[in-house]
């Protein structure tokens, strides 16, 4: 997963706004960040670095960069090692001038494309599939850049939500299947493109609309011009996991509030849990309170508490000062583990029957550690509730999920998972209820990680075991 | 406000545990951090630096520091400038050997002590009042260190929760009035002292008990030995603001859960608000939801929602990646202000009647900015509810409150504050209800910031206007 | 100017040796540094960063990188801005696998190559001409990498001393004109390639021989295999400025000691200066001492003093602690200027007649500032002696010389230069004497910066005025 | 060894000049640096940090610090560990106001003073003896600061060259024995105090005179006022090692040029070496050239070459880019050792007979490593010449010499040292000749490290074996 952001203005310098927009998308990627623009000589420039936005980039110098169009990217740490070469935007000058691309998603016909491009002399300087798009553009040296881009995008398959910077303007493009979100915002006469609408609030802009699946939108001094990719899609494939976990709760995707979707997932989960004679609401009566894993489980737990009438409690505390890289993995730290970041309140759990809500259960590692800490607090009962279906299949469209072998639900029964985690009971939301909670028709959503139903059937991402590169 | 931590073991190296303990107390101070120990030569050593614990200290080298006793400190940024000289623990070697002190609190008879000490030749290398305690110890060169410490503490007035490191052992001391919390924890045979019990969870220890007001507790190879300061206190003065805002919700102070106190404050606030014909629950019916300022207002809002039956909503989102020092105050950033850190969900507020809960209202600046952002989201009504009484007086016992002129409630009526903030209504919790919510008798609590009732009457802290030092 | 280094071993890990080798070549480039290797999956990896070797690279992690072949590069800061994208080695995976290139030199037919490549779909991600070589290799997708490299090198014109990393082994290549030095070293069974032999001492290796102009040397498990580029060269063009200034004095190039060449330049300069009735050795007798600009003028000054019999004096002191980036250009610092780095000894200059030797005079800025400081020391006379001919033409083969307008000797007479610098007299070494001092035949040396005689006639490097990129 | 600097102006801000002055004194200490001033509230402020001046201090903020008096200090790394607490200036506020002290030297009656002070209640927050002076001042709370300082300095014994900052002005003080240099400089109406005159050049000031032994000089709006300590000295004890090694060659101490002293030491050494039938100039004729260890041996080697008529050669090259902390001590680096920093020119040494000059031989470690590298270059003969007498005794007056056991010359004969180092011959300069070369009478110089003749007889510095603190 990654985040992309672009800005176009007729008059204002926008490089710092791209920086700020990336800060609002920081949850979509913490490995690297970059901002690209075209300088007065018609050459593409890029500032990029490893780490969080404020570590990777120099806000001060961007605030002084005198350009009215710019794009940016935050990259998620995936297998294969973090390297500055993989940081985006990827930029190049080619026969028709400068081009910079920031990409959220994953191409699925990369290996075919790559062989074909390499046989024509292309070199790949990163392990990112985004570079292939750049080559496809460059291999149409006689076409105008926008036409070459349209031609290139017709040939790639998979997930792409792009912002592209050309001399002609800022371009937003979304694959015909609409895997990843991409939205258009506006403030005064300026236009913004973002992976999520939450970035608009930060810079004082408002959401105009989603970039539509298969749409390529050019923004320049002539305003907005919309192009269409020749659609190969007979249905939509918007990632349902964006609603479950990835997106920020204050974002709105295809008209649906992420917050309300999560809240409704929690509500439905409560109804299910109660309905099937679950002892929490059954003979033994309701639990004492609904806790959650901060921050991923918060919104669903609010819905669960509301629906069940069981009190809501912030009973697991997250240490806000313990970040990504602050703790060295010494012997003592390994012993203490997740307790350095998350702390259940002894005071609340002791002697009580609690429900613990989280948004999803992938490997199950963190949940298991927290449950065992709650056990040490002498909780009487602890029931784990997951506000999405079991994750049983890897994602090939832009999320760095583990291979099947590491997915807790891929091979184990619910009872086995509950037992290994140490919960008194475990239940998930059904796929249909999740879809209902999101509020979009099921045939507009991708649910492959839950049901294995991929756009291209049972695709395989063949990754090198040691380096993680496909 | 500051945080102190100490560790004593017969066998284990503890310097890294002090580091980790300080991480759990990081909310009590972000200006500087330090860890002190006595080396094999009987000399006191200290590692300290500016910034957060992980910035100021080198965990790796502490994990290799071979000592079985150590103390630490995190310091809150106060007026007067941040200087490495003010970082604690303050350490010295004097006639009877090494001594290191970490102090949470503020002495009120400092200027008298200081004159008297300076007239005997004392030099002050910091602007911290803690140094005075060290001098009082050293000016009894013939007494054993512990006796000198007891003698020194008899002479100081004001708030002190201390951990002190002597060759004799680790000492915990709390002033006779009990202004600031201080607790004893245990894990296997090791003892820990902490400003708050939340630090015990992080290192796998459990809370044993509070250090009592006026108690001086020596921990060494003979176990625990308790001493008593000659009590000048006829009642307790435990800071009620610890329950309102300062302490972490998973801490327990004098037997009372901070979480439950805050939740009960929210409940009582809801009862009040409903009881007096407030239009939110009056003719116009209840509000649509209860929002809060994250993270300070969370727990009270949970109680408010529970009691009022109005749905609870995480409607203001905090950007977890925008920290203390990450944003340069460029022109654009000044325009955007608090919106870079806090973002109200347009989606939830638009067209709705909302209650916004926060724990306290000091200057009112942040609340005002958030309310105006909520207004831009087209909220129909916005009612601000504060789960503590109006802050009308400065604190002289360890919190860096602004001078009276900057306290919103010091000179303005509630209606004026509401108007200037832009809220449709504003109400506070009463002092008596706050005390009830905490669950301790009123004569064990200091409520001076609310009622001006100071231990020593209307004391004055005379600070230099330009440097902030008293 | 840049420095390149490569290492091949059958058994030893060599990445750290490349790091250390680059340290010995640090004088050839301080803008960025990088090390590349091929990992177990057959993919090329690279660590690179901005700044000095120890800033840009992590020695510790390189010392743990388990590879027996690696190459490295240090880059000189040139016009056009420092960017991480320009840091080398440039690495890519193409149809035939991985390739990494580190380049010292400058191609002169770049614009032709670039147009042709771009028209075939090539994209340029840096502003470096090295990338063109990579594209030329990749555009022969059916050939084995070494053959493709040989084919590519036949097509480029200009200066290149390369180390290339292929799956087949480490390759050293030098252009047919031999503009830049490149040497082969050995330690036990390991082979090393370096821009200069001084790097061999540092790692305990010894100089075997120069890579010959037009030679392409493959080093792998079969030992050394030498290939020849189809020579287009009827004479040699080894850069004479390497002997004057660029190379470290303990290096040996094409069998000639840089130290001895410089010393002999100084000797000849002394003979000239004495011979033409120069007042320093004429009627008014010899000067009191021979001073020099440290460190560039040291060796020539030694020769000058030796030959003239005038005492040698270290009369200008360089502050060894004032490095590249240590001083902020505040108002006061701008006033003080070069005096922060260089300090003439008042004690030695006052009342004396001194000769000041430097290796070359390009812009004349530093010399002018030092001369005026020496004047403030009340020197009686100050005679500037330059141990190379006037620099009148820019270099197109790898040195970042200023444009003609900024070359002091391009438009001014000697007397005018002396006057503007403030020296009582100024003399240069003649081109013929410089060539004699080097000890190689004149038709093996490039002297274009002195005489404008370029390989390809009066070539023009057309650089964009604002970005410096050609 | 340390460096001190002070500046006084009626009108100009001087904090940045102190910063720049410290840069010129950086060779006197690289462990820490600090600058102190008195703020508008009459409180002493200090910026200090670990490392080189540019690492420890923020030039930018000092350039904006609006004060017309300031003092600074660079500290040498000594045994006992580097700690920020030991960084100077040491600052305090006491009964009579603010005081800051920067100290070069070492007190010899510290343990007596310390016991006496501790018995009066003093606390020592550092392991530096400078703090004792501060306490002595503060223990005269009724006297004006300058009088208290005079009183304090009457009581201390040993080496002190101080700059002190009081509300009354900037004070320079030098012990009655004059162990360490201290000089007064001037630029326009501003006065400067510095350990060495070389710092004056950097800021454009000129040397006025030395602060005399036993002089205390007050600089304020009344100009210069000189006081005298009650002299306990019947002769001078100016450190001769300042002329041998410590001071920068462009400094002048007590009227004597350091450069000329070193040059003359080299000349005398050449005469000696020649005079006693040494084979280098004896039957076997003169050596081929005079090399030196850069930079310590440079000036003496110039004198040696001049006197002997043997050519001077820069035959050992120092890597200017390998600094203090740049190389991690990996296995490979330990194998390569000093060769990473120093590189003998194979080309010059091979087959030749060389003299290697260094200024002094303390442990002999570096000399030994360089000699063995020269041997690997196939030098025919290598004769080591030291331009000072054998160092046989530790220094108690401010230099961090090793204990006697580690001094090469303390227990070994010359022949044994030569053998262990691997030189064909070794000779030293005699003490009398060194004194002649310096040009001051022997009874004005301390030569204790050479002859064991200490001010207070065979004093002993009793240091803790593990922590190095006395």
Image: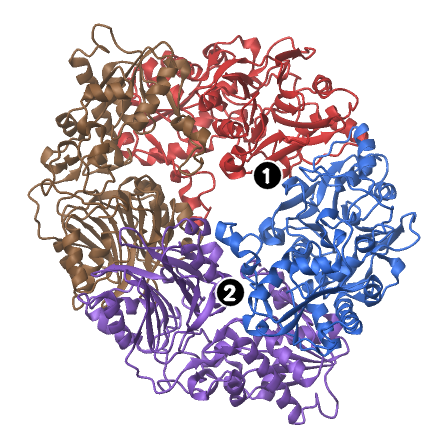
Chain colours: A blue, B purple, C red, D brown
Q: Chain of mark 1?
A: C
Instruction: Judge whether residue A55 can be spotted in this image.
Output: yes
Task: Name the spot of residue B168 as percent of width and height, x first.
Answer: 28, 62
- Residue B267 vs residue D270: left or right? right
Q: Quadrant of residue D22?
A: top left
Q: Out of D99 and A452, give the one closest to the viewer.
A: A452
Other-residue count near label 1 (Cα within 10 Å), few / some / many at <14 / 14–19 / ≥20? some
Q: Out of D115 and D351, give the one closest to the viewer.
A: D115
Q: Out of D195 and C37, give the one closest to the viewer.
A: C37
Q: Residue at x 56, y 18 (%)?
A: C182
Q: Chain of mark 2?
A: B
Quadrant, the N terminus of chain D: top left
- Residue B72 vs residue D104: left or right? right
Q: Which mark is residue C31?
A: none
Q: Taking C331 as reference, is D269 above or below it? A: above
Residue bearing mark 1: C82
- Residue B74 vs residue C163: left or right? left
Task: Name the spot of residue A305 as percent of width and height, x first.
Answer: 71, 75
Q: Quadrant of residue C157?
A: top right
Q: Could you give the CA–CA distance between mark 1 and mark 2, rounded to whole angstroms?
A: 49 Å
The secondary structure type at the circle numbered 2 is helix
Residue extending farthest to the left is D234
Other-residue count near label 2 (Cα within 10 Å), few / some / many at <14 / 14–19 / ≥20? many
The secondary structure type at the circle numbered 1 is loop
Task: Name the spot of residue A284 as percent of width and height, x first.
Answer: 70, 77
Q: Residue at x 22, y 67 (%)?
A: D96
Q: Residue at x 81, y 30 (%)?
A: C119
Q: Which mark is residue B201?
A: 2
Q: Out of C264 and A266, give the one closest to the viewer.
A: A266
Residue extending farthest to the front is A283
Task: Name the spot of residue B91 as percent of width and height, x first.
Answer: 31, 60
């Amino acid at each position: 997963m990654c985040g992309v952001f672009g800005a176009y203005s007729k008059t204002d310098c926008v490089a710092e706004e791209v920086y700020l927009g990336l800060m609002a998308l920081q949850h979509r990627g913490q490995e690297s960040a970059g901002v690209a623009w075209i300088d007065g000589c018609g050459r593409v420039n890029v500032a990029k670095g490893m780490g969080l936005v404020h570590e990777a980039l120099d806000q001060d110098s961007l605030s002084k960069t005198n350009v009215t169009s710019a794009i940016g990217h935050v990259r998620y740490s995936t297998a294969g090692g973090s390297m500055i070469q993989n940081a985006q935007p990827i930029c190049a000058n080619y026969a028709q001038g400068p081009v910079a691309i920031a990409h959220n998603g994953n191409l699925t016909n990369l290996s075919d494309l790559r062989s074909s491009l390499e046989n024509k002399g292309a070199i790949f300087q990163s392990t990112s599939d985004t570079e292939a798009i750049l080559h496809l553009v460059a291999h149409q040296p006689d076409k105008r850049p926008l036409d070459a881009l349209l031609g290139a995008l017709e040939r790639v398959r998979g997930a792409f939500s792009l912002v592209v910077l050309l001399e002609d303007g800022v371009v937003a493009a979304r694959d015909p299947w609409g895997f990843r979100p991409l939205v258009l915002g506006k403030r005064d006469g300026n236009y913004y493109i973002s992976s999520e609408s939450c970035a608009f609030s930060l810079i004082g802009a408002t959401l105009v609309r989603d970039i539509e699946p298969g749409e390529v939108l050019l923004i320049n001094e002539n305003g907005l011009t919309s192009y269409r990719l020749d659609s190969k899609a007979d249905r939509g494939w918007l990632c349902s996991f964006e609603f479950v976990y990835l997106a920020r709760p204050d974002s709105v995707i295809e008209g649906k509030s992420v917050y309300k979707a999560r809240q409704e997932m929690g509500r439905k989960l409560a109804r299910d849990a109660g309905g099937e004679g679950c002892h929490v609401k059954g003979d033994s009566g309701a639990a004492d309170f609904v806790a959650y894993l901060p921050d991923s489980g918060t919104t669903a737990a609010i819905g669960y508490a509301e629906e069940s009438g069981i009190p809501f409690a912030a009973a697991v505390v997250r240490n806000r000062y313990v970040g990504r890289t602050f703790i060295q993995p010494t012997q003592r730290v390994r012993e203490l583990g997740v307790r350095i970041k998350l702390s259940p309140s002894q005071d609340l759990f002791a002697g009580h029957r609690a429900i613990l809500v989280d948004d999803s259960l992938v490997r199950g590692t963190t949940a298991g550690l927290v449950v065992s800490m709650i056990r040490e607090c002498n909780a009487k009962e602890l029931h784990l509730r997951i506000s999405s279906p079991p994750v049983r299949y890897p994602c090939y469209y832009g999320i760095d999920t583990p291979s099947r072998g590491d997915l807790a639900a891929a091979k184990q029964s619910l009872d086995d998972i509950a037992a290994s985690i140490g919960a008194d009971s475990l239940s998930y939301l059904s796929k249909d209820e999740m879809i209902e909670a999101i509020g979009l028709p099921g045939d507009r959503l991708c649910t492959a990680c839950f049901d294995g139903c991929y756009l291209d059937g049972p695709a395989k991402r063949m990754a090198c075991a040691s380096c993680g590169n496909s």
